[in-house]
Image (cartoon, rainbow, N blue to C red):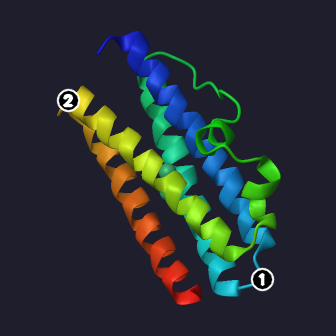
Amino acid sequence: MHEKELIAKLNWFYSLELNQVDLYTAQAHAMEDIYLAKTLARIAAIEQQHVDNMAAEIKRRGAEPTRLGDVISPLLGKTAGFLSGLAGPKAILKLDINLEEKAMKDYKDLIVRVGNDGHLFDVLWDNLIDEDIHTAWFANKLRELE
Ligand SMILES: [Fe+2]
Ligand SMILES: [Fe+2]
């Protein structure tokens, strides 16, 4: 994978993770269920770690992390208002599961492409596993509400 293409890809993940921090923080504020609100806030903090580790990988390659704007709405075909919690807990959980699954698929694709090149490979795996754990928690909570 060419360095330029890799940096573009890392910037896409950087933007996705930034969007997820904003999204889950907004959802946390919109939720009445305190356990759901606290978990979304905690997950937003973990997404911030992903923002930071993607930024570090971009900088390690001599580039500046660049926010590409809203990458989530086009990914899910939903508006910002719907995404931020106006839709109610069940719809939000379904949407978040969808989003986490898309992120996981993209992390898996990049892991295969970069191969075991050391540090980046490990960082991508760390983020992938976190997204998997988020998905599992969301799915479990959704079952509880249904
Ligand atoms: Fe993430
Ligand atoms: Fe996540």
Q: Amino acid at mark 1?
A: Glu
| Viewer-nearest residue: 61 or 28 | 28
For the question of whether residue 27 can be seen, the reply is yes
> Which residue is at 59% across, 40% downward?
75
Dot 2 falls on a residue whose secondary structure is loop
Q: Position of residue 129 (x, y in %)?
A: 34, 57
In this view, 62 is above or below 98: above
Q: Is residue 101 left or right of residue 17?
A: left
Q: In the image, what residue type sits under mark 2?
A: Asp
Q: Secondary structure at mark 1?
A: loop
Residue 124 versus residue 62 in the image, above or below: below
At a point 57% along the width and 60% down the height, the residue shown is 96
Which one is nearer the viewer's eye here, 116 or 101? 101
- Give the residue at mark 1: 32
Q: CA distance from mark 1 to mark 2?
A: 44 Å
Q: Which mark is residue 117?
A: 2
Residue lying at 46% horizontally and 80% vertically, measured from the top left: 140
Q: Tell me if I can see residue 41 in this picture.
A: no
User: Can you say which quadrant of the picture contains the N terminus?
Assistant: top left
Q: Residue reaching furthest left?
A: 116
